[in-house]
Image (cartoon, rainbow, N blue to C red):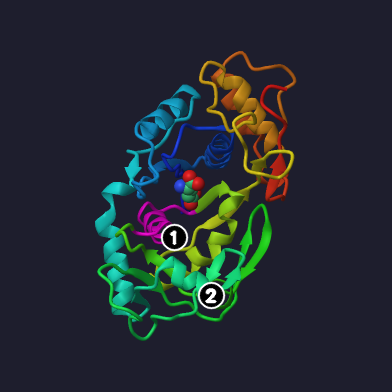
Amino acid sequence: MATTYRGRFAPSPTGPLHFGSLVAALGSYLDARSHQGEWLLRMEDLDRTREIKGAADRILLTLDEFGFTWDGPVVYQSQRTEAYEAALQTLIRKGLAYRCSCSRKEIAQIAQRGKEGPIYPGTCRNSLKKYRDTHSIRLLTRHEEIICTDQVQGPIQQNPGRELGDFIIRRSDGFHAYQLAVVVDDGWQGINQVVRGADLLMSTPRQRYLQQLLSLPKPDYAHLPLAVDTQGRKLSKQYRDAPVDSRRPLDSLLQALAFLGQPLPTEKPDDLSEFWTWAIEHWSLKKIPAQRQIPVSPANQ
Ligand code: GLU
């Protein structure tokens, strides 16, 4: 029997749904539904320091107003701490993770800079460099290439040992890191297709590595281009970083569909249901431009 496609959308409640997150929601949704698959929602509210009060409910409301439907209850990462801690303890028991007391400042002074930030030089690998009240937990990395084929962006490669160094899986303030939580949850929720924004493309090798260490199944990945402003910068308020307009869902959905390189109906659909039928029927991952970023013009033009 063929495995059921199971995808997900995993927003962080750091603000309302904007054009960029709508693109990720739409891409993951259409890919799932065009494969008769399930689409799950996970609220990545692990980092309470970045959370905006009310944003999670607002995101869910907007998705509903736009006509997205999801399967099963919404999972909240803030309620899954025990699962992340259990995975972390497994890694420690296997000798794959260790305590680190280095401060950011100390690391910045000695570390080389990589594409993803300072490359941790392994200072606390064998023992804590300094005693401190709090410490983070780092994952041991190897000097070994991890090669993945992304369904949109093509082959990617990373050597975590050389390019990242041992990375944090539990922060010194006690929060489990995104890389660990996402892998634990994708495994637990049985996600076999991850469709998300290309800002996370180079997180995939780390996630593959963690899946291997935790004996978790490996989903397939498709990374969608990110909407940036005409200078290649993160979207600002004048651009489409403003919350999507719930009074005109069709307009935003059609713009997001065009952004993903999909064909548009010749006439504007009469309602959301007509839009969704068209979009699911005509969806093709192959039509998505294999770019990590695509500039969009200001929303008011
Ligand atoms: N929570 C992440 C975000 O909102 C997405 C994580 C993922 O899809 O793996 O950017």
Seen in the image, is 261 located left or right of residue 185? right
Q: Residue at x 45, y 35 (%)?
A: 15
- Residue extent of the magenta highlight: 176-192
- Closer to the camera in the image, 247 or 279: 247
The three-letter code of the residue at mark 2 reads Ala
113 vs 50: above or below:
below
Q: Residue at x 55, y 48 (%)?
A: 195
Residue 231, visible in the rendered structure: yes
Q: Which mark is residue 111?
A: 2
Residue 183 image point, x, y percent = 42, 59
Measure the C-alpha gap from mark 1 to mark 2.
Answer: 21 Å
Seen in the image, is 219 located left or right of residue 13? right
- Closer to the camera in the image, 163 or 262: 163
Q: Quadrant of residue 180?
A: bottom left
Q: Is residue 189 magenta?
A: yes
Q: Is residue 151 magenta?
A: no
Q: Main secondary structure of the magenta part?
A: helix
Secondary structure beneath dot 2 equals loop
Residue 11 image point, x, y percent = 45, 42
Secondary structure beneath dot 1 equals helix
- Closer to the camera in the image, 254 or 151: 254
49 vs 283: above or below:
below
Number of marks in the rendered image: 2
Q: Which mark is residue 179?
A: 1
Residue 5, visible in the rendered structure: no
The three-letter code of the residue at mark 1 reads Gln
Q: Residue at x 63, y 69 (%)?
A: 157
Seen in the image, is 57 located left or right of residue 249? left
- Tag 2 or tag 1, which sits nearer the N-term? 2
Q: Which mark is residue 25?
A: none
